[in-house]
Amino acid sequence: MKYITSCFFILISALILLVIPAMLHASASGGTVTSGKQSETPQATTSPGLALTYRNIGIGLGDVQLVQGLRLNYRDRQLKQVDGINITMHRPDDNINSRIRGWAIGLPLTGGGNMYGVSTALLGITATETLRGIQLAGIGMGAGGTIRGIQLAGLGIGAGGTIRGIQLAGIGMGTGDSIKGIQLAGFGLGAGGSIDGITLTGLGIGSGGHIRGLTFAGLGFGASGPVSGINIAGFGFGAGGPVKGVNLAGLGFGSSGSIHGLNITGLGMGASGSITGISFALMGIGAGHNITGLSISGIGMGAGNQIRGLSLSGIGTGAGNHIRGLHVAGIGFGTQNMTGATVSLLSLGSGTAMGLFIAPLRFKMEQEGSLHGVSISAYNHIAGTQHGLTVGLFNYSGNLRGVQIGILNYAGNNRSGLRLLPLVNANL
């Protein structure tokens, strides 16, 4: 019995070795070599190749159209479907509409219309429509439609449709649609649509939509839409919409919308909307609307409307409308209205100041402004109305409704002889 089995395998092997060269040559040149009887379902037209099959089950040598089993060919031109193992040497015709389910092997290239299962190639894998499953290519792979599953390419991965799953490319990855899942590219990654998931590249990332998830780029990344999640860029990143989450950039980042969360940059950050959360910049922070939360900048910060919360700046802080909370600036503050407590060398307001204000050099309120609270400064200059207490070397009030303590104190609304007084002046 063992002798009969060995002879059978030797016979089959010899047949394959003798017929394969002729089949591959016929397939490449477009000739016709056929053998066997094709099954009635599914239908197959005459094709160059040898079908050692029964009802399409068996071995196909050359460009056999329908095989369930093992198929070997040089280049697929007329393939319709393989369920099993398909081994090729060259990429298929560009207009092929085949379906491969199982294991596609490229020595060195393979491809098809829609490929499902496992695909491995020494050089490359191409699909006119879909790649789905596990694909491994020494150089690269591409699909005219979607790529889904686990894909690894030595150089690059490209798709006309979406890319979903786990993808690793030695150099880069790109799609005309969206990317979802876990993606790692040695240099860069780009999507015409959105990017969702964990994305890491050595240089940069670009998205025509939003970026959401964990994003890391050695240099920087950009999105035409919002950015959310944990975002880290070696130099900087930009978003066409809001930025939310934990954002870290070596130099800086910007948003055409708002910024929310924990934001840290080596130089600065800016938003055309509001900045909310914990923000740290070695140089500056700027917002077109509000800055809210804990904000620290090495040089300065500014907001088109309000700054609220706790802020610390090395030089100055300014807001177009209001500063609220506890704020410390190395040199000065400038705004219309101030509420809370501020500490700086200089402080300037044109509206209402309510709270405690400490300015060692000068505290100034314009004529239309007023103070409600306590101001401590070498020179308190309140051209408008003072409600409360000022302490300094020289205190000036155009309209006093409180107490002044200093070497000289001037109250413009007191009676003649009581306007300029030493030590203490009051109008209660």
Image (cartoon, rainbow, N blue to C red):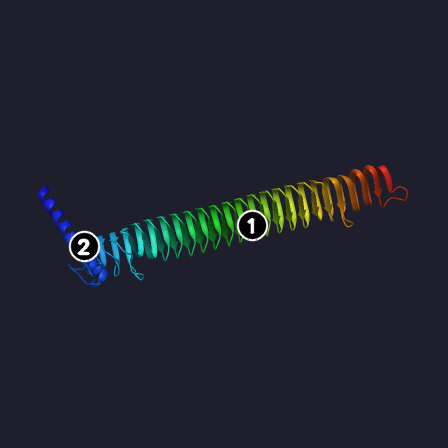
| Residue carrying label 2 | 20
Q: Residues within 10 Å of mark 2 (few under 14, many from 20)?
A: some
**Circle on res. 254:** 1
Local secondary structure at mark 2: helix
In the displayed structure image, the side of residue 282 where residue 218 appears, left or right: left
Camera-side residue of 230 and 426: 230
| Residue 428 visible in rendering | no
Q: Residue at x 66, y 43 (%)?
A: 315
In the displayed structure image, the side of residue 381 where residue 103 appears, left or right: left
Q: Residue at x 58, y 47 (%)?
A: 269
Q: Report the amino acid beneath label 2.
A: Ile
Q: Name the quarter where the C terminus is drawn.
A: top right
Residue 25 position in % (x across, y down): 20, 59
Camera-side residue of 106 and 34: 106
Q: Residues within 10 Å of mark 1 (few under 14, many from 20)?
A: many
Q: Name the quarter where the N terminus is drawn.
A: top left
Q: Report the amino acid beneath label 1.
A: Gly
Q: Quadrant of residue 403?
A: top right
Local secondary structure at mark 1: strand
Residue 201 position in % (x across, y down): 44, 47
Mark 1 vs 2, N-terminal side: 2
Residue sitting farthest toward the top: 423
Cβ atoms at labels 1 and 2 below 8 Å apart: no
Residue 137 position in % (x across, y down): 33, 49
| Residue 4 visible in rendering | yes
Residue 67 position in % (x across, y down): 22, 55
Q: Is residue 56 above or below residue 216?
A: below
| Residues at marks 1 and 2, CA–CA distance in whole angstroms | 62 Å
Number of marks in picture: 2
